[in-house]
Amino acid sequence: MNPRRPPRTDVRTRVLLAALAVLIVASFVSLDLQWRAFFSSEALASMARFVAEFFPPAHDPVFVAKVVRGAGETLAMSLLGTALAAVGGLLLALPRRGRWLARWLMNALRAVPELVWAALLLVAAGLGPMTGTLALALHTTGVLGRLFGEAIENAPPGPAEALRAQGVEGWRVAAWATLPQVLPQLVSYTLYRWENNIRAAAVLGVVGAGGLGQMLAFHLGLFQMGRTATVLLAMIVLVLAVDAASVFVRRMLMR
């Protein structure tokens, strides 16, 4: 009796895993990673001294009030940028003529990082939260457009075909048949990108895009480590709060 031949999918999986292992080993070999220097006693002592400078965090009421306003600005930037991106991504993802052009635009938008978009937009929008919001919206539009497009393409075709059989065409098919099926998935994708945009909004402040990131860059540049620690704590609290809210909403959608 001949031995059972492995399925083609198993062979492909093994080949893919082997290729990934080769790439990982090649990455370690090609990069000059100074692990011995990184874990040396001198490096560890330097890092300990640097971390000790963050304590105690600044807690004077005037500065804490500024941090709270910065956190609100960061939250607003991420929320508005994500909302604009969800609308733009959905418009690019909906099936229509010129699909190749929409795919090209989505690839171009998400290929440019948020930080680069912010640097480019500084010329037109100047310093402030508008630059950060637009940078988040442009990059996230490309990401959500790709995710939305895949969700729509993988939706069960039955309801759409039933509407077409009754003479319904165009956007009505997507609005009444396709989108209701994939709406929970689209909302889940949007919430996940909102979580990421909270972190990205904090980083965008480095180029003057407002929010906590701008405060972080300012105080860290002046070596005001106590105030820097307070800003970092505010970032951590904000990220944890948004993550918890996102998880709660996704669980509600899955019920």
Image: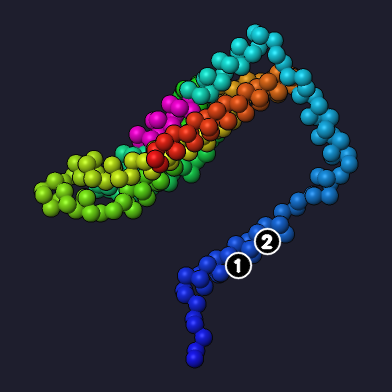
Identify the residue shown where x is 36% and y is 48%.
151
Instruction: Tell which residue pokes out farthest to the bottom in this image.
Output: 1
Magenta residues, start to end: 77-88
Q: Helix, strand, or loop for circle 2?
A: helix
The kind of secondary structure element at disc 1 is: helix
x and y percent of residue 16 in the render?
55, 66
Q: How crowded is mark 1: few (under 14 residues within 10 Å), some or many (20 or more)?
A: few
Q: How far apart are marks 2 and 1 (CA)?
A: 12 Å
Horizontally, residue 222 falls left or right of residue 164, namely right
- For discs 2 and 1, the disc positioned in front in the rendered view: 1
Could you say which disc has been placed on residue 26 in the image? Answer: 2
Q: Which of 244 and 192 is in front in this view?
A: 244
Q: Residues within 10 Å of mark 2 (few under 14, many from 20)?
A: few
Q: Quadrant of the C terminus?
A: top left
**Residue at mark 1:** 18
Residue positioned 84% across, 30% down in the render: 49
At x 80%, y 29%, the residue is 50
> Which amino acid type is shown beneath numbered disc 1?
Ala
Residue projecting furthest to the front: 255
Where's residue 176, x and y in %? 22, 41
> Magenta stretch containing residue 201, yes or no?
no
How many numbered discs, if any? 2
